[in-house]
Image: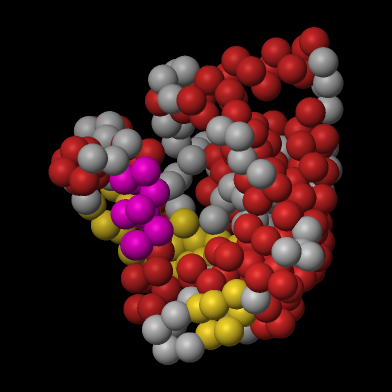
Amino acid sequence: MRDLKLVVEETIKKYNMLNYGDSVVVGFSGGPDSICLLHILMELKDKLGLNIYAAHLNHQFRGKEADEDALFVENICKEWGIQVYVKTFNVPAYAKEKGLSSEEAGREIRYKLFYEVAEKVNANKIAIAHNMNDNAETVLMNLFRGSGIEGLKGIEAVRDKIIRPLINVRRDEIESYCREKKLNPRIDKTNLEPIYSRNRIRLELIPYIEKHFNSNIMSTLQRLSEIANMENDFLNKEAEKLFLEIAMVSKNSIQYSINKIKNVHPALVRRIIRLGIER
């Protein structure tokens, strides 16, 4: 097994995720991914000069089990000397009220909590435990939706305050790390049931691909994601330069020079128009 502490440290350097003295809020569900991330960041705490906090959402999806998750999180944080913020919120009721899926509602409230805690403790980074498998699943889901290059870039390693130090770590490596360090994470049994599209990709499609087509599909999709990220970044920068040349921006309108835009490659025209809409 790879040295995950070293892998995470290299990922942090590669994407310039953290600077010495940063304050970080770690999204901590109590599951394998997040406890692995929190443990590794605590191992790197002194070397990187980090101030570490944890945030946990009791989303009330799983009744007593969700309450036990919250208690587990509080106990671990007490044992490790981490200040933790736990919020209980009726996500099922919120999802119904807003017409959202349970996944969408949970994500919305969870990230809202992370940003609230970051503001409260004056943290400049929020660490999320997405891993290589999560990224592969996202790339495949976006592919099935007919997404372009922006969807193929998958989960970004860094976005705004959000950092994902486990993005180059496989789920099986995380599980092995948890066993080796005797972390005894909580297990959300709904992740083991093919009840959502993402779960079916995780539990059925990817194992099928690994068995019949590409045993190294995780690394293949990770490489695709990194290439798409670089190329998407290049196209966005080119579009921004051309927007400044082609667009005439006033207080109430944006006009484009037809003579100039007709000579622009179609791959960039859509991005240029979108830049105008976003202004």
* Residue 118 % position (x, y): 42, 73
Point out the residue furthest to the front here: 259
Whether residue 103 can be seen here: yes
In the image, 151 versus 157, the foreground residue is 151
Q: Please say whether residue 107 is one of the residues in the magenta stretch.
A: yes
User: What secondary structure is the stretch in magenta mostly built from?
Assistant: helix
* Residue 20 % position (x, y): 68, 82
Left of 197 or right of it: where is 116?
left
Q: Residue at x 43, y 47 (%)?
A: 29
Left of 45 or right of it: where is 168?
right
Whether residue 23 can be seen here: no
Q: Residue at x 38, y 39 (%)?
A: 103
Task: Identify the coloring.
Answer: secondary structure
In the image, 231 versus 215, the foreground residue is 231
Q: Is residue 151 above or below residue 273?
A: above
Q: Quadrant of the N terminus?
A: top right
Q: Which residues are magenta?
A: 104-113
Q: Residue at x 83, y 21 (%)?
A: 215
Left of 139 or right of it: where is 112?
left
* Residue 212 % position (x, y): 80, 10
* Residue 251 % position (x, y): 42, 89
